[in-house]
């Protein structure tokens, strides 16, 4: 991270809260690796002055204490389900009264340096929500590159908006939080919570903006997942689940 990025992040940090959720099994090699990346993400987030909210869904207490030692606020998940964990994290972020909320997966370490970049257009009233756009997908496992490329192409073809939807992070003004908090879906309520409410925002004429970020996927995570049948199947399942949900929801919202 450059000195300019550091200075920019710290100058805006009092206006931004970062929210995420975690779940790591200490007996799985992939989860051990991901938890180490998450530690780095959280350390970087708090070192830049961001209030950092974590809702944990069942990780080991030792890991949660480490997160707290790095300066994050950690809460246990109250209701089961991926969507519920995300909503709880958003609600706790909203309760901080910060102007801007950023959601990111805890393994997106490289994104933290650009959080302030995604918040600037909102603070300048040029956007209500920012969807970060990666410059390249080349640092990802090949299966993920293909899946996310096709997912984004599907979104663009259907909606006419060229957004990097399959990149998880979102940054929005606190007033838009109800779009996510009130969303409970028949589509599985997993990843769709950060896709389908975006359609609601479009229908309601909110200002959506794409901001390019220089994200690089963790090399160790890519090496671990590159030739994994399990992760390949996960990408296919996500792509199938989300594209069906997006198309169905889009049609419903444009018939009302």
Image: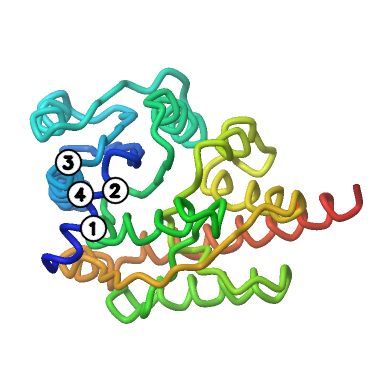
The N terminus: image quadrant: bottom left
As drawn, is 210 to the left or to the right of 38?
right
Q: Secondary structure at mark 4?
A: helix
Disc 3 crowd, CA 10 A, few/some/many (<14, 14-19, 20+) = some
Task: Report the residue marked by disc 2.
Answer: 12
Check contact, mark 4 vs mark 2: CB within 8 A. Answer: yes
Above or below, 123 against 64 in this view is: below
Above or below, 208 against 145 in this view is: above
> Distance from label 4 to label 3 (Cα)?
10 Å
Q: Residue 226: which quarter of the image?
A: bottom left
Check contact, mark 2 vs mark 1: CB within 8 A. Answer: yes
Q: Secondary structure at mark 2?
A: helix
Q: Residue at x 40, y 25 (%)?
A: 92
Disc 4 crowd, CA 10 A, few/some/many (<14, 14-19, 20+) = some
Disc 2 crowd, CA 10 A, few/some/many (<14, 14-19, 20+) = some
State the count of labels. Answer: 4
> Distance from label 3 to label 2 (Cα)?
13 Å
Mark in front: 3 vs 1: 1
Check contact, mark 4 vs mark 1: CB within 8 A. Answer: yes
Q: Which mark is residue 10?
A: 4
Task: Report the residue marked by disc 3.
Answer: 46
Above or below, 33 against 182 in this view is: below
Check contact, mark 4 vs mark 3: CB within 8 A. Answer: no
Q: In terms of depth relative to the viewer, which is nearer, 245 or 130?
A: 130
Q: Secondary structure at mark 1?
A: helix
Mark in front: 3 vs 2: 2
Q: Residue at x 36, y 59 (%)?
A: 230
Task: Report the residue marked by disc 1.
Answer: 8
Above or below, 162 against 108 in this view is: below
> Distance from label 2 to label 1 (Cα)?
7 Å
Q: In terms of depth relative to the viewer, which is nearer, 90 or 230?
A: 90
């Amino acid at each position: 991270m450059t000195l300019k990025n550091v200075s920019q992040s710290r100058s805006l940090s009092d206006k931004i809260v970062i929210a995420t959720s975690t779940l790591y099994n200490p007996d799985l090699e992939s989860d051990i690796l991901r938890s180490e990346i998450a530690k780095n993400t959280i350390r970087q987030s708090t070192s830049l002055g961001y209030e950092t909210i974590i809702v944990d869904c069942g990780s080991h207490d030792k890991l949660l204490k480490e997160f707290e030692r790095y300066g994050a606020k950690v809460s246990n998940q109250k209701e089961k389900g991926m969507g519920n964990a995300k909503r709880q994290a958003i609600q706790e972020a909203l309760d901080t009264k910060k102007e801007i909320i950023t959601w990111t997966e805890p393994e997106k370490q490289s994104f933290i340096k650009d959080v302030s970049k995604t918040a600037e257009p909102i603070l300048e009233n040029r956007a209500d929500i920012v969807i970060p756009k990666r410059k390249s997908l080349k640092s990802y496992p090949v299966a993920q590159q293909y899946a996310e490329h096709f997912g984004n192409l599907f979104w663009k073809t259907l909606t006419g908006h060229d957004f990097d939807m399959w990149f998880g992070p979102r940054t929005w003004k606190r007033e838009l939080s109800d779009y996510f908090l009130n969303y409970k879906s028949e589509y599985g309520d997993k990843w769709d919570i950060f896709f389908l409410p975006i359609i609601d925002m479009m229908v309601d004429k909110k200002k959506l903006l794409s901001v390019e970020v220089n994200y690089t996927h963790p090399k160790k995570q890519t090496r671990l997942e590159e030739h994994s049948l399990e992760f390949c199947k996960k990408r296919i399942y996500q792509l199938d689940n989300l594209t069906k949900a997006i198309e169905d929801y889009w049609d419903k919202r444009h018939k009302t």
